[in-house]
Amino acid sequence: MTAMRILIVHAHPEPRSFNGALTDSARALLPTIGHELIVSDLYAMEWDPVSDRRNFTIRADPERYDQQAEERFAASAGSFSSDLRAEMDKLLWADTVIFQFPIWWLGMPAIMKGWIDRVFAVGVAYGGGKWLDQGRLAPRRAMLSVTTGGGAAPYADVGLYGPIDPILYPIHHGILRFTGFQVIEPFIVYGPSRMTELQRAATLAQYRLRLMNLASAPTLPVIHAADYENFVRRQA
Ligand SMILES: Cc1cc2nc3c(=O)[nH]c(=O)nc-3n(C[C@H](O)[C@H](O)[C@H](O)COP(=O)(O)O)c2cc1C
């Protein structure tokens, strides 16, 4: 089995939550099967999700703040703030990234969105016409591991929220595939708080199985930048 360098970005305020149990399972398992593991536990780190001038130690333009222009400058000058640099180093070190979070308002908790807003900077995660399979973060792989409040019913075709795939699409496509990740099928736990202890234990066992088979887990279709660019040319 090929050893992987895995980064788990974990966003849950309560260590004894089901999200906490999922990440604890990963912590216990992954090193014992030969993988290297780093966990960024965002609440424990008191991660600051607000993306602004404080991302930079030097400003390209002190008069008017343009975040992407500042990022482009900082990527070449090496002037990201130290908290950002530390997370960027972990991201670039990893070949596989797992995002562990509860669905909040059909998206990710703000602390995790803020990690992406700040860490996925121009010149680090995207920019220079590099995207999709040619993206700066290729050939990394990523997987969402998420929990929901209700059971599966609200996520049925005619359910309150509707199917989960379109809900996760902005993350899968707009963030991960855009920056070059190959996206592993998500691990979704519907309504862990409605489960019996036995069901929760069985779900944790399924997660361990997924982690053991991470290298061969199915992925979403790759979109080739060349195909997209040909498509745009044909529309012009
Ligand atoms: C601010 C907030 C927003 C939430 N929004 C949703 C939602 O849109 N859909 C949903 O299924 N559950 C929602 N929930 C419920 C959580 O997803 C649920 O409590 C969590 O996934 C259970 O995992 P845990 O036991 O690890 O906390 C929300 C919870 C909070 C606190």
Image: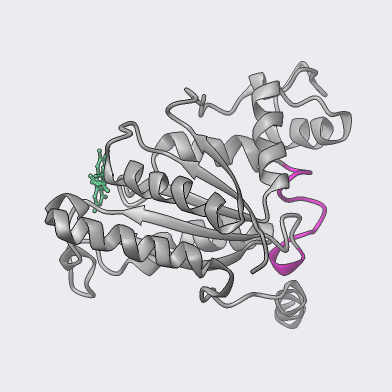
Examine the image and state in which quarter residue 117 appears: top right
Residue at image location 51% in from the left, 61% down from the top: 172
Residue under the point 55% across and 58% down: 33
Q: Nearer the viewer, residue 105 or 199?
A: 199
Point out the residue furthest to the bottom here.
234
Q: Position of residue 160 (x, y in %)?
A: 17, 62
Identity of the residue drawn at 50% across and 56% down? 171
Return the residue nearer the eye: 173 or 41: 41
Main SS class of the magenta portion in the image? loop
Q: Going by the picture, which residue comes out furthest to the front?
A: 32
The quadrant the N terminus occupies is: bottom right
Q: Name the image quarter holding the C terminus.
A: bottom right
Closer to us: 104 or 160: 104
| Magenta region | 122-134
Question: Where 51 falls versus 104 (above or below)?
Answer: above
Which residue ends up furthest to the right in the rendered image? 77
Left or right, 112 with reference to 104: right
Residue 47, compared with residue 106, is above or below; it is above
* Side of 232 relative to 159 (left or right): right
User: What colour scheme does the image use?
Assistant: one colour
Provide residue 222's location: percent of width, then percent of height: 63, 75
**In percent of the image, x 49 and y 65: which residue is there?**
212
* Residue 227 picture location, percent across and down: 73, 80
Reply yes or no: does residue 57 show up in magenta: no
Q: Is residue 95 left or right of residue 188?
A: right
Q: Position of residue 77 (x, y in %)?
A: 88, 29
